[in-house]
Amino acid sequence: MTKPFDPWVLRAKVSVFLDLYRKGREVERLRAEIQDLKRRVEKGT
């Protein structure tokens, strides 16, 4: 038997997962940028 779902609860859950996904991508982008900057600094010295 399936339970009825509240569309507002579902929307809130999807919103949370979407936010986590976006933040994860931002963290990955910043990590790559930091690595690139480290390489540039090491090359210059």
Image (cartoon, rainbow, N blue to C red):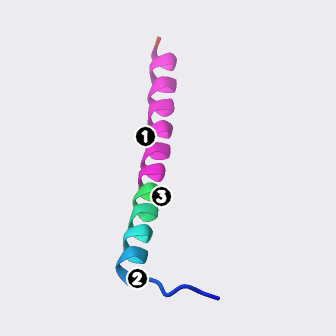
Residue 14, image x and y in percent?
44, 70
Q: Earlier in the sequence, mark 2 or mark 3?
A: 2
Residue type of the residue flagged with mark 3: Tyr
Which residue is rendered at x = 45% and y = 43% of the image? 27
Q: Is residue 29 above or below residue 10?
A: above
Taking the image as shown, residue 26 lies to the left or right of residue 2, namely left
Which residue is rendered at x = 46% and y = 62% of the image? 17
Residue segment shown in magenta:
23-44
Disc 2 target residue: 6
Q: Earlier in the sequence, mark 1 or mark 2?
A: 2
Report the magenta stretch's main SS.
helix
The nearer-to-camera label among 2 and 3 is 2
Disc 3 target residue: 21
Label for residue 30? 1
Residue type of the residue flagged with mark 1: Leu
The nearer-to-camera label among 1 and 3 is 3
Residue 42 covered by magenta stretch? yes
Q: Nearer the viewer, residue 4 or 44?
A: 4
Q: CA distance from mark 2 to mark 3?
A: 23 Å
Which residue is rendered at x = 42% and y = 49% of the image? 26
Residue 15 covered by magenta stretch? no
